[in-house]
């Protein structure tokens, strides 16, 4: 047996001593929609609700085997790796110092504290993962601790590969396609290496958030590059630079095999999985499922595994997710309306609304002229085509307006 697959299997066996394999579940709803056998590898049901516990456990297990006196471990994480490290620190009885971006959802911070207990110290540093990473590496060098990379470490990659070990064991035959989320690349690198050795006919597709496409950028440049800007909404996969070690494995991935998921579309997928299936997924955890519509013409009749990588979702974010999903589906829009300053003008506007149109926001901004004022209006409706009817009515009535729903600059300041 090739070296890597044996090590991944050894890692999976060691994990069974402390937590069970995550379920591989056939999803009837998705299978019917895409005329395929769609299975979900439920990493959102691990002890820390993400696959990150695997790499953390394997790396710490190996580090302690080589240096039993090592008592301090350091990591940087946007949340899920932190929880995995915290859980494993408590399991092995060692001290962990965990650096997290200030923007990390509060739910992930609190869960990290719960999983680590007295064994961990949390330090909030910077707005983005890469800032926290630099601070963690500096601290680690100063105190001589062992650094646990979230992805760019061979033992972590090997641990993440245990996902593939389990899904191959759990299915009656190897899948035709596995869909993987990509952040720093640790999971993807591990699964790719294992499947290449054990199930080379299984195809793999990769999904990364559109606002954090570090793998795509690296494939384009032929080397890891740092993205100038990252959208942190998909916090579990919003990494500005893919790992060097992970890219060594992924450098031959065809560019067309990497799909980009718009952040607002991910919100649609999250709500669908919650409302229809009762499955709570964080944005990164929904990436693989979110790619299915783009692959619909390729997967009919095939066995497909989507890796739902995490379920650490802070429900305080649910209104934002709903809002973004509505905007993506075209059933909620914002506009700036030039409202005449005369009696009856507002009534005239309201009479143009259809029976399914609802005003979600109404705010006078300022008087733009003596006889007119600017109004910010948010409207929700049931079907996107209702807005075409409304806009025709506004045009016919002589109302001046501007749709700012997709104007990122104006939305940033006004919504």
Image (cartoon, helix red, strand yellow):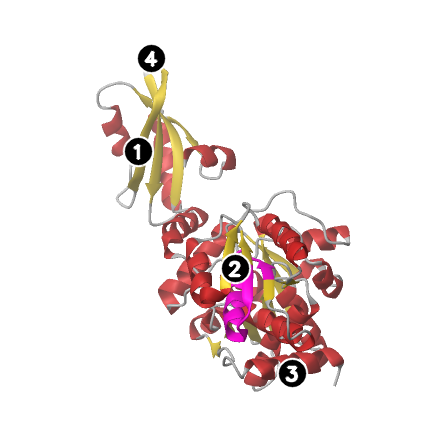
Binning the other alpha carbons within 10 Å of mark 3 as few (below 14), some (14 to 19) or many (20 upward) gives some
Q: Quadrant of residue 349?
A: top left
Q: Secondary structure at mark 1?
A: strand
Q: Which residue is rendered at x = 73% and y = 66% of the image?
A: 249
Q: Nearer the viewer, residue 88 or 46?
A: 88
Q: Secondary structure at mark 2?
A: helix
Q: CA distance from mark 2 to mark 1?
A: 33 Å
Q: Quadrant of residue 5?
A: bottom right
Task: Kindly report which numbered mark, 1 or 3, lies closer to the viewer in this rendering.
Answer: 3
Estimate the x, y position of residue 104 in percent, counting from the top left.
Answer: 49, 52
Task: Kindly report which numbered mark, 2 or 3, lies closer to the viewer in this rendering.
Answer: 3
- From the image, tell me which residue sits under label 4: 370
Q: CA distance from mark 1 to mark 3?
A: 60 Å
- Identify the magenta region: 74-97
- From the image, tell me which residue sits under label 1: 362
Q: Nearer the viewer, residue 219 or 227?
A: 227
Q: CA distance from mark 4 to mark 1?
A: 20 Å
Horizontal placement of 351 versus 144: left or right?
left
- From the image, tell me which residue sits under label 3: 10
Q: CA distance from mark 4 to mark 3?
A: 77 Å
- From the image, tell me which residue sits under label 2: 284
Question: Does label 2 or label 3 sit earlier along the sequence?
Answer: 3
Q: Secondary structure at mark 4?
A: loop
Report if the CB atoms under discs 4 and 1 are less than 8 Å apart.
no
């Amino acid at each position: 047996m090739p070296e890597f697959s044996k090590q991944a299997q050894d890692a999976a066996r060691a994990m069974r001593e402390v937590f069970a394999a995550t379920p591989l579940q056939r999803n009837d709803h998705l299978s019917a929609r895409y005329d395929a056998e769609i299975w979900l590898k439920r990493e959102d049901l691990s002890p820390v609700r993400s696959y990150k516990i695997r790499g953390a456990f394997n790396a710490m297990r190996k580090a302690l085997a080589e240096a039993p006196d090592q008592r301090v471990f350091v990591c940087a994480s946007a949340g899920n790796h932190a929880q995995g490290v915290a859980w494993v620190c408590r399991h092995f009885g060692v001290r962990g110092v965990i650096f997290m971006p200030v923007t990390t959802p509060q739910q992930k911070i609190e869960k990290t504290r719960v999983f680590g207990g007295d064994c961990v110290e949390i330090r909030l540093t910077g707005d983005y993962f890469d800032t926290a990473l630099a601070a963690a590496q500096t601290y680690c060098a100063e105190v001589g601790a062992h650094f646990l990379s979230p992805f760019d470490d061979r033992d972590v990659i090997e641990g993440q590969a245990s996902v593939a070990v389990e899904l191959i064991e759990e299915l009656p035959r190897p899948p035709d396609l596995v869909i993987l989320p990509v952040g720093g690349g640790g999971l993807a690198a591990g699964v790719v290496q294992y499947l290449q050795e054990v199930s080379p006919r299984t195809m793999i597709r990769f999904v990364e958030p559109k606002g954090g496409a570090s793998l795509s950028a690296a494939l384009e440049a032929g080397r890891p590059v740092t993205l100038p800007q990252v959208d942190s909404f998909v916090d579990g996969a919003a990494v500005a630079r893919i790992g060097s070690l992970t890219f060594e494995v992924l450098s031959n991935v065809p560019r067309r095999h990497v799909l980009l998921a718009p952040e607002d579309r991910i919100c649609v997928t999250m709500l669908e999985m919650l409302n229809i299936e009762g499955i709570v997924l964080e944005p990164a955890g929904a990436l693989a499922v979110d790619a299915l519509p783009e692959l619909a013409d390729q997967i009919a009749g095939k066995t497909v595994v989507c890796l739902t990588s995490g379920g650490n979702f802070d429900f305080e974010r649910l209104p934002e997710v709903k809002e973004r999903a509505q905007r993506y589906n075209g059933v909620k829009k914002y506009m700036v309306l030039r409202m005449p300053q005369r009696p009856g003008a507002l009534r005239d506007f309201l009479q143009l609304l259809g029976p399914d149109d609802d005003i979600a926001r109404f705010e006078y901004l300022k008087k733009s002229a003596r006889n007119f004022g600017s109004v910010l209006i948010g409207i929700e409706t049931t079907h996107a085509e209702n807005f075409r009817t409304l806009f025709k009515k506004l045009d016919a009535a002589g109302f001046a307006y501007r749709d700012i729903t997709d104007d990122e600059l104006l939305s940033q300041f006004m919504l």
